[in-house]
Amino acid sequence: MEPVQMKDIICKELDEHKAVHINVLEVEHMTSMTDYFVICTAKSTKQVKALAEFVEDKMKEEGIAALHTDGMSDGNWAVLDFGDVIVHIFNGETRLFYGLEKLWSDGSNLHVYPEKTDENK
C-alpha cells in the first residue's frame, strides 16, 4: 500500500473516532525515517488509548502491522510506527509541550484533516 493511502486510512479512522486537530506533516523531503507524521489530539487519556487501538486494528485489517508502538498504556501520548507513516496521538497538554508541528514544519508541509473543500467549509 502506498504511504498516501495509509495516511488517508489512518486520518479517516481518527476522524471517525472523534480525534481532534488532526494534522499531517509530509516529512519525506526532511528525513529518510518516514514519509508522513499524522498528529492528533484526544480529549482524555482513555481516548488516547482507544484511538491508538482503533488505528492499530484498522491497519491490521488492511494487512499492515505496526513496526513499533509506545505509550499505549500511559494515555498521555501514543505513537504507532507503520514505517511510511508514524502516528502521534496526544492529550492536549502533552501535544502543546512537545510541539511536533513546530519542530518538523518548514511552513509548507502542514495539512489539516479533513481537508476543507467548498462542500465542508
Image: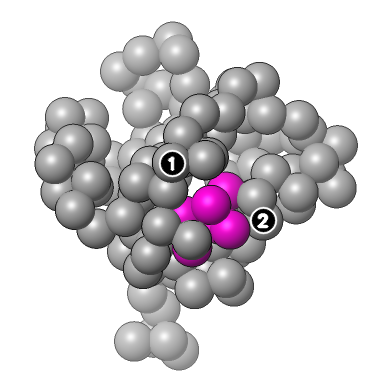
Q: Is residue 83 magenta?
A: no
Residue hosting label 1 = 74
Question: Residue at (36%, 14%) from the top-left corner?
Answer: 31
Q: Is residue 108 visible?
A: no
The residue carrying mark 2 is 54
Residue 113: percent from the left, percent from the top?
42, 63
Amino acid marked by disc 2: Phe
Q: What span is in magenta?
A: 47-52
**Amino acid identity at mark 1:** Asp
Examine the rendered structure and indicate whether residue 86 appears above or below residue 52.
Answer: above
Question: Which residue of the protein is positioned furthest toward the front in this rendering?
Answer: 74
Residue 28 shown left or right of residue 110 in the figure: right
- Residue 78 % position (x, y): 46, 40
Q: Main secondary structure of the magenta part?
A: helix
The kind of secondary structure element at disc 2 is helix
Colour approach in the figure: one colour
Kindly identify the residue that appears in the image at 31 percent across and 55 percent down: 91
Residues packed near mark 2 inside 10 Å, few (<14), some (14 to 19) or many (20 plus)? some
What residue is shown at x 53% (from left), y 52% (from top)?
49
Horizontal and vertical percent position of residue 117: 40, 78
Image-based side of 84 in relation to 110, left or right:
right
The image quadrant of residue 44 is: bottom left
Structural distance between the alpha carbons of marks 2 and 1: 16 Å
Q: How many marks?
A: 2
Rendered-image quadrant of the C terminus? bottom left
Mark 2 and mark 1 lie on one chain; the one further toward the N terminus is 2
